[in-house]
Amino acid sequence: MKKTWWKESVVYQIYPRSFMDSNGDGIGDLPGILSKLDYLKDLGIDVIWLCPIYQSPNDDNGYDISDYYEIMSEFGAMEDFDRLLHEVHARGMKLIMDLVVNHTSDEHAWFIESRSSKDHPKRDYYIWRPAAKDGGVPNNWESFFSGSTWQYDEATGEYYLHLFSKKQPDLNWENPEVVADVHKMMKWWLDKGIDGFRVDAINHIGKADGFPDDPHPEDKSHNTGYRLFANLPKVHEQLQKLNREVFSRYDIMTVGETSGIGPREALLYVDENRDEMNMVFQFEHMSIDSGDGGKWDVQPWSLPDLKQIMSKWQTELYGKGWNALYFNNHDQPRAVSRFGDDQTYWAESAKLLATFLHTLCGTPYVYQGEEIGMTNVAFDSIDSYQDLESLNFYKEKVSEGADLAQVLKRIHDKGRDNARTPMQWNDGPQAGFTTGEPWIQLNTNYMDINVEQQLLDPDSIFNYYKKLIQLRKQYEVFVYGDYQLILEDHPEIYAYVRTFENETLLVILNFFGRTPTFQLPDCLHIEAPELLISNYAVAADREIQEITLQPYEARVYRLP
Ligand code: ISL
Ligand code: CA
């Protein structure tokens, strides 16, 4: 297996709007990030992934870009960015940017020109269609953010396609001029010295020829049309070209966001011989708690399901392509609330999930606040929510006459604002995030959960993450070891062995609040194991043939 820096790295994801505000306007910004670089360095972070910071009207908090060559004025100016990049590098860290090229903002100059007339040279930068024969939308595709993917535009009497909000028109990747402009823009940023890209919604850049109706609108596992605009062969053609013409010319890392795939399809993106991307964010483990009642319906998840999914990814990619590991990001609820216990065993379960994240094969991604165990939020009223996906979902349900308490419950469980409340720096006013009014309400638990307090506590979640990250740097087996599941059918204990050259790790994770007994399988003969880390005070180097585990206990042993 090829060794590279991005396999050995730990990535920290920053959602700039909610990270740190430097000037009291309530909005996180680039100087705010700059002021926290030493904090990230102390944690042991190698790479920072910045969510979009380009000029944007913020319909979707920067995922709607109106100018790829400018910084969003609320976040600062290009000089702030240059200084940030310089200071990141000065600390021996790297920085990757979010690349949003499935769509732009409707306020991007290209779209303004495109919509101006049917024969404008920029018309085909976007996807325009006349009304269907019945006078309605061109097909039955449903947007990720509710409603049709088609928006009627008065000026020319046609519809444009938007897989996300109507202020995020999709670029037309069939147009070579679009492709050339995107490549040019990427090179411009890479020439500035950034270290790679997280490539947003890249699996959606190809759409089925002829824009046919989805024949199965009754299938609620995805929005209608999904299979006609996700992971099509065209996407790979574009990525190979992108790799040839852009990625391969720089020493960078690339991670694509690709929903709707299993490991077999993932290898089309990340097989080291195919030269597309280094790794992708898959979504299979993010759906283990999805019920069948449509968007954001939740059901209890089961450990055997989680084991089955993670084991499949661990073994099928091993030696061929690389995994991106994550349990949180800016679109998902907080992992400690979702897969752990954010009440009784808050710290224990946050550390358990951390142990899992850092002991699998792949590159771990830590989302801001995860390292201090930040939790979900449940605002009482829809008026406190800011995320357009949540707001559109609520509106749609109102129009369907749904039970609004139920709808709010779904937003509490799965809405994206769970991840977007401001970073909790201390227990002072506004959690130290801003001296002004934050753009979104804080989670009121910042008195108990905050960075300042955890830096002082040697047993904090923060210090546990720090230790795990150090271990990863100390022992290559954390990064390059293979993965072998043991106790496959155990409903509460998730355990596996990692081996690389002459090093072996044994990871034991009790995923719930009970006290099951771990029994070492006969095939493993172990003497004098070395306890590397645990979230309980347990005596090191003891017999591990049989162990009664504490609630959410996690242990990692190194076997001689
Ligand atoms: O919805 C999905 C799976 O649940 C994905 O298919 C989809 O790719 C994902 O929602 C895309 O998210 C990304 O692009 C959005 C943006 O709002 C998100 O924040 C971003 O992560 C549009 O740019
Ligand atoms: Ca600010």
Image (cartoon, grey):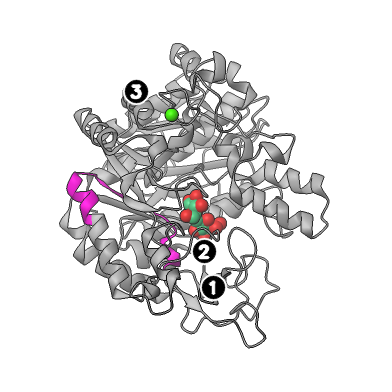
Q: Is mark 1 within 8 Å of ligand 1?
A: no
- Image-based side of 298 in relation to 439, left or right: right
Camera-side mark, 1 or 3: 3
Element at label 1: helix
Q: Amino acid at mark 1?
A: Arg
Element at label 2: loop
Looking at the image, do the residues carrying marks 1 and 2 touch, with CB atoms under 8 Å apart?
yes
Camera-side mark, 1 or 2: 1
Residue bearing the label numbered 3? 35
**If you read the primary sequence from the N terminus, does the residue marked by circle 2 or circle 3 appear first?**
3
Q: Is 235 one of the magenta-colored residues?
A: no
Q: Which mark is residue 260?
A: 2
Q: CA distance from mark 2 to mark 3?
A: 38 Å
Q: Residues within 10 Å of mark 3 (few under 14, many from 20)?
A: few
Q: Is mark 3 within 8 Å of ligand 2?
A: no
Residue at point 61% right, 84% down?
132
Residue bearing the label numbered 1? 227
Q: Is residue 151 visible?
A: yes
Residue 79 is situated, as x and y percent measured from the top left of the image, at 25, 34
Element at label 3: loop
Q: Is 191 one of the magenta-colored residues?
A: yes
Q: Residues within 10 Å of mark 2 (few under 14, many from 20)?
A: some
Residue span colored magenta: 187-205
Q: Which mark is residue 360?
A: none
Q: CA distance from mark 1 to mark 2?
A: 9 Å
Q: Amino acid at mark 3?
A: Ser
Looking at the image, do the residues carrying marks 2 and 3 touch, with CB atoms under 8 Å apart?
no
**If you read the primary sequence from the N terminus, does the residue marked by circle 1 or circle 3 appear first?**
3
- Image-based side of 338 in relation to 207, left or right: right
Residue 481 is situated, as x and y percent measured from the top left of the image, at 33, 45
Quarter containing the N terminus? bottom left
Q: Is mark 2 within 8 Å of ligand 1?
A: yes
